Image (cartoon, rainbow, N blue to C red):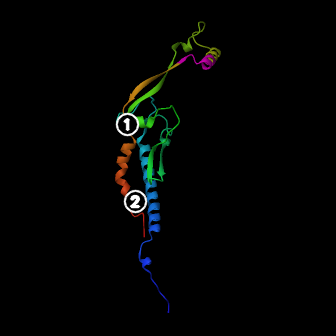
Amino acid sequence: MAAFTLTAKDFFIDHGAVAKAVGVANFKALRSAGALGRTHARRQIKFTKNRGKTSQPGKPPRAHRRGKGIKTILYGYHRPSESMLIGYAKLGGVAGRDVPSTLEYGGTAKIRVRQVRKDRNRRSKRSGTLSDSQRRKIKRYYSRYQSDVSVSTMTVRVRKRPNMGPMLDAIQPKLPELWRDQVKG
């Protein structure tokens, strides 16, 4: 005859196993939410070949080169708060200049303006055009001394062109579906 014993402990839930399963499911759902948000934010940025053409205020910013700005939209899991962070990676640049924040919320930014002197390619008196050797000499001279370019800074007002806020509004209805049926018993 087989012995069969039960203790009161067998009727309770193993809290450690449940907490671990919920943590793993939460991580998977947050990872999916981060990927969804990053994809949506990247797709909102439109490309233009014309460098002078900017987006309308209130619309997502435009990019002039494929991959440069879009590749900096990343997502990452923050373990202490068990949350997902989606946004632009902070890149090295000019101190005190936060381009993604300025684009998202608006504000002021200092920009560098380069002006090229008009008389750089002055014409030769003899032929009316520059010869190749003259062109090379001028190019070598100006590249050495940089006297043909003057750089100044000016402060410009940037109206907001949000990208992350509308992204969150767009994916928020889809988020509960990511957690549905994640923990199975």
Secondary structure of the magenta portion, mostly? helix
Q: Residue furthest front?
A: 8
**Magenta segment, which residues?**
139-149
Q: Position of residue 111 (x, y in %)?
A: 46, 26
Camera-side residue of 6 and 37: 6
The number of numbered badges drawn on the structure is 2
Q: Residue furthest top?
A: 125
Specify the label residue 179 is tagged with. Answer: 2
Quadrant location of residue 182? bottom left
Query: Does label 2 or label 1 sit earlier along the sequence?
Result: 1
Specify the label residue 105 is tagged with. Answer: 1
Q: Identify residue type, mark 2.
A: Trp
Residue 17 vs 8, above or below: the answer is: above
Q: Residues within 10 Å of mark 2 (few under 14, many from 20)?
A: some
Does the magenta segment cover residue 143?
A: yes
Q: Residues within 10 Å of mark 1 (few under 14, many from 20)?
A: some
Q: Residue at x 36, y 54 (%)?
A: 174
Q: Position of residue 179 (x, y in %)?
A: 40, 59
- Helix, strand or loop for disc 1: helix
Mark 2 or 1, which is nearer the eye?
Answer: 1
- Assign the C terminus to one quadrant of the image: bottom left
- Helix, strand or loop for disc 2: helix
Q: Position of residue 157 (x, y in %)?
A: 38, 28
Taking the image as shown, residue 141 lies to the left or right of residue 73, namely: right
Does the magenta segment cover residue 45?
A: no
Q: Identify residue type, mark 1.
A: Tyr
Q: Position of residue 55 (x, y in %)?
A: 38, 34
Residue 137 vs 28, above or below: the answer is: above
